[in-house]
Image (cartoon, grey):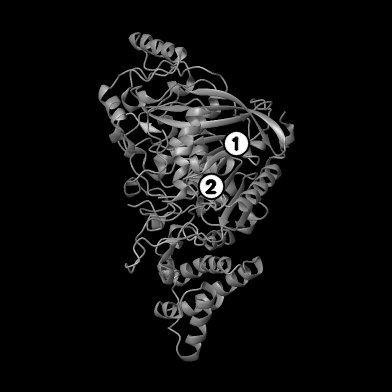
Amino acid sequence: MTFPVALRALALPLFVLVALPQVTPREAAAQERAGGARPKVNAASEAAKETAKEAAKAGATKSDAAKPDAAKSDAATPDGPKSADDASVAGKPEGKPGARTDNAGTSAGVLALLPADSVTEHTADIDGRPLAYTATAGTLNLYGQSGERTAAIFYTAYVAKGADKTASAGRPVTFVFNGGPGAASAYLHLGLVGPKILDFGPSGRDGANAKLVDNPQSWLGFTDLVMIDPIGTGWSRTAKADDAANFYGVRPDASAMAKAIALYVAHNNRAGSPKYLLGESYGGFRAAKTADALRQEQGLIVAGIVMVSPLLEGRLIFGASRYPLGAALQLPSLVATELERRNAFSREAMAEADRFAMTEYMTTLAGAAPTGEAAAAFYARVAQMTGLPLDVVTRSRGFVRDAYLKQLRESDQAVVSRYDATLVAPDPYPESLSDRGPDPVLDGFTRAYGGAFAAYARDQLGFKTEMTYQLLATDVNGKWKWDNGGGSSRNQASVSDDIRELLALEPSFRLMITQGYSDLITPYGVSRYVVDHLPPSLAAGRVALKLYRGGHMHYTVRPSRLAFTADAKAFYAAATGWDAKQTD
């Protein structure tokens, strides 16, 4: 999940509060030129621009108008795209080099800084054997009814060689995105699934000296991968800066993502491949909404979804720590953190924490404040389980989550991260009574994913642009439209009904949810509660909840990443019956 005005914790949590991309002077100049030449990439790129100009003179609305998807583009309304047909793409089929034949010459602005799609060939050792693959870094273009390009969505695709991309191939393709709203896909890309991974050194948090290394456990071993950056993140931009907010909402975001996926599927002959979605944090929420948009607007059915630390029910997260049920669902994550601190973590101890949280703890909080010996015994037990000072537990009447971040390590003048409460950092404001500093995970070492990906795309994937890669924006969360997301605010955001309908409408659909024990952004207790309350007739054998040591981005912990990857591989094999060894 995710991500995040200070892009930080749950005050704007997991949903990395995102914002409008920062525009560099060079980008601003490109906006002003409104039609200026894009940076020269190669001869093919220049030829493509000339072709586009000739098509424009001939009165063509799009140089790829012959493509069915390009021809049936509906108008984007002031409220943003209402369906996936509000957008279309012009692009070379994945795996074939050459410049895009779009109308970039007539739709300039900052999009003129985007180069032609880059296609490169690679080989990696994955699962103990060499695997040849094709990498494509490029963009999918969205158009309005006028035929003008309104936005470009950046993506990176990895396709294993020897995997026939026709309907008979059977090899899955997974579409990957992060959350925020406002986070680019570099987290999951370089943190979990891609052929390269960012190594943060022995401490696991040294962002200054992080190095990009081979990922022998890349998911490319069992599924092709397409990483997508939503509008306002990565190198995905609108042609006009003022139009970006039209995409900042649950429904328009899902429709745009669904259209991008449909375009990739059509241009790369993947209609017959099992299609999966992988989303982290808000990206898990986005995955459920996008699956619905794919079915209703694009006629595409997903085979399964993998959610990493997802937002499932806003009412059980935002402000929930003040209520008995919310506090009970969050308590086990606090206990897990204390067990890790004492080197006493075990699944048996966590099972006892789960039991206590949903029985004695919750019922005590729900009733009148305990008194006498009963109060002393109850508060002492909560203090012992969480590691909090007894006076803090007593003063808060057992509702301890909000006091946890600041008070747990106050004597050391240190704070813990909402994203992984086992990670402690010096408190930059020790004199403050509240937690007000940057988050050690979100605002710390994980920011290195942005610079690492920009360099990787330039140097190894051949995608060279002067545009700034936006790992996290800074202002969009406040503009996000939660309507049609199950409510008018994030507190009412819900995908429980979406999950039920996916399970009911598609008998082969499968769902895997993964969580880190010490995640305080989206505590694992919330996901367990949602899963436990799905109808057994729908969920039995089809919905799995997997727990790992670590926090919101539990894949940054190497043993957890390896375990997660093994579980994911088994999930795909059970759902599709496809054997990864079929790939040459």
Residue type at tag 2: Phe
Q: Residue furthest bottom?
A: 372
Which of the 4 quarters of the picture holds residue 489? Answer: bottom left
Q: Are marks 1 and 2 in contact (CB under 8 Å)?
A: no
Total labels: the figure holds: 2
- Crowd band around label 1 with a 10 angstrom C-alpha radius: few (<14), some (14–19), many (20+): many
Which of the 4 quarters of the picture holds residue 60? Answer: top left
In front: 366, or 213? 213
Residue of label 1: 195
Q: Residue furthest left?
A: 32
- Crowd band around label 2 with a 10 angstrom C-alpha radius: few (<14), some (14–19), many (20+): some
Kindly identify the residue that appears in the image at 41 percent across and 42 percent down.
Answer: 251
The location of residue 156, given as percent across then percent down, is: 52, 32
**Image quadrant where one finds the C terminus:** top right
Which of the 4 quarters of the picture holds residue 437? Answer: bottom left
Residue type at tag 1: Pro
Q: Is residue 352 above or below residue 69?
A: below
In front: 389, or 374? 389
Ranked by sequence position, the earlier of labels 1 and 2 is 1
Q: Can residue 395 be seen at all in this image of the molecule? A: yes
Residue of label 2: 200
* SS assignment at label 2: loop
Please tell me the numbered disc located at residue 167.
none
Q: Is residue 375 left or right of residue 58?
A: right
* SS assignment at label 1: loop
